[in-house]
Image: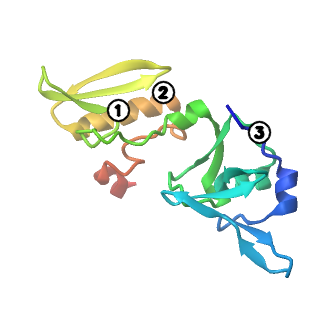
Amino acid sequence: MKNKRKLNSKKLKEKFLADFDDGKIYRRLKSGRLKECAYDVGNGRMAIHHEGRHVARGRVIYAMYHGDIEPWMVVQHINADDTDDSINNLRLVTRTLARRRRRQYSNNTSGFIGVSWHKMSRKWYAYVFVDKKLINLGTYHDPREAARVHDRAKVQAYGIEHAWTNARAGLLDDERKAA
């Protein structure tokens, strides 16, 4: 982890002011006015320049509210919206937990997480990775059915809080409307 240092909440509080409800960071100007100091680094993600490096705004807000953050910990957005840095939407997780919430690959043909087309059986194949091991969940005629099986297996393996499922990602519209 090159260039990673512990984020010191005391130094952050001396330099910045935070609006924890809105997820914004301000710097006090010499005139006494406040100026928002985050800048867009792409995809709506915001960063702050602190001690010669760029630090994600959500990470700064979390550190100012909860205290120092070790470099191996990741601040994750609970609702998966990287633009929402309000304190209620942030949680601290390990890198391993953070990796479980990967975005879909661009070459995904099923439109669902953990579902692929099986050419030989001409059916949809559901799978899940648990502890770096691929677990086959069977083949299905309907990709939605395979996606639901994947979601149940992921919740069973990781718990409801840490399982990034098709329903939570908004890929199963019928389940999202029912929830």
The residue at 76%/37% (across/down) is 70
The residue singled out by tag 2 in the image is 157
Q: Is residue 110 above or below residue 36?
A: above
Residue type pointed to by label 1: His
Please state the horizontal and vertical placement of residue 159, each as a whole percent of the image.
52, 34
Q: Considering only order in the chain, which callout, 3 or 2, is on the residue closer to the N terminus?
A: 3
Q: Is residue 77 above or below residue 140?
A: below
The residue singled out by tag 3 in the image is 5
Q: Is residue 27 above or below residue 5?
A: below
Please state the horizontal and vertical placement of residue 18, each as a whole percent of the image.
75, 65
Binning the other alpha carbons within 10 Å of mark 1 as few (below 14), some (14 to 19) or many (20 upward) gives many
The residue at 56%/57% (across/down) is 41
Q: Secondary structure under badge 2? A: helix
In the displayed structure image, the side of residue 119 where residue 39 appears, left or right? right
Quadrant holding the C terminus: bottom left
Q: Considering only order in the chain, which callout, 2 or 1, is on the residue closer to the N terminus?
A: 1
The residue at 31%/48% (across/down) is 172
The residue singled out by tag 1 in the image is 150
Q: Secondary structure under badge 3? A: loop
Is residue 101 or residue 26 the one in the foreground? Answer: 26
Binning the other alpha carbons within 10 Å of mark 3 as few (below 14), some (14 to 19) or many (20 upward) gives few
